[in-house]
Structure formats: C-alpha cells, structure tokens
Image (cartoon, rainbow, N blue to C red):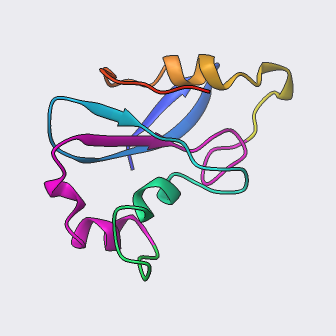
Amino acid sequence: MPTFYSDGLRFNYATRGVGSYTFFFQHGIGGNLSQPFRFLGSSNDKNLNAVKEAGSEALPFRLAAFDFRAHGATPLGDPKKLCLERDRKRYPEPLLVTLSS
C-alpha cells in the first residue's frame, strides 16, 4: 500500500482508474480508504482487491483516497495536529479536481 507523511505521521492511500482528472473522495466517520472504492464495484465487494477485479481500473478518471487519522491503518498521532486540509495538501500526487465541503 502506498504511503505519504504529514506531521511525521504515515498515511495509507490508494488510487484507481485512469485518465487525466483525479476525483479525490474521502471516507465517512469510522470508515477507511476502501469505502469510496466500494461505490464503483458490486455490493459484494469487501476490499480494494475485489474492486480492482470488478473493473474500476477502466474508469475514465482517477479516484484517490487516503485513511484519515485514526482510521484504517493510519494512527491518530498527536491530537493537537488534527487538520484534514493540511493532511490532504501533503497527498503526494497532483490533484487536478478536488471537492471540499
């Protein structure tokens, strides 16, 4: 699993699909980075490998996601440094399209 660092904390991330545009999608509270990818496969998909086999690599865009702090395989780290936007800015791949709330 690829990783990147923010404030010394290791984050896991994944991408799927091809194309020149990247849609950056994040999981909900209590989820992990596999949650966004499940929307692209069948309801029986249980992990990223199952989604990959379901054909999400053929998407005309890229979907990217990472585990929030204290979610999935990413530890909490220093609670005083919680900042989703700062962590997202340290994501290593260029994002041509981003959506934020």
Q: Is residue 63 magenta?
A: yes
Q: Is residue 42 left or right of residue 18?
A: right
Q: Quadrant of residue 70?
A: top right
Specify the farthest residue to the right: 80
Position of the C terminus by quadrant: top right
Q: From the viewer's perspective, tell me whether residue 5 is left or right of residue 76.
A: left
Q: How many marks?
A: 0
- Which residue is farthest bottom? 44
Point 55% across, 25% down: residue: 100
- Along the line of sight, which residue is nearer the eye, 79 or 37? 37
Say which quarter of the image contains residue 19.
Answer: top left
Q: Is residue 8 magenta?
A: no
Q: Residue at x 69, y 38 (%)?
A: 69
- Seen in the image, is 27 located left or right of residue 57? right
Where is 20 relative to 12, above or below?
Answer: above
Spot occupied by residue 95 in the image (x, y as percentages of width and height): 34, 23
Q: Return the x and y of residue 93 as percentages of the image width and height.
A: 32, 25
Q: Nearer the viewer, residue 12 or 62?
A: 62
The x, y position of residue 3, in whole percent, is: 44, 38
63 displayed left or right of 8: left
The residue at the point 65 percent across, 50 percent down is 28
Residue 79 place in picture, x, y as percent? 84, 29
Identify the residue at horizontal 62%, vertical 44% (top origin): 74
Residue 92 picture quarter: top left
Q: Is residue 30 above or below residue 90?
A: below
Q: What's the magenta region?
A: 47-75
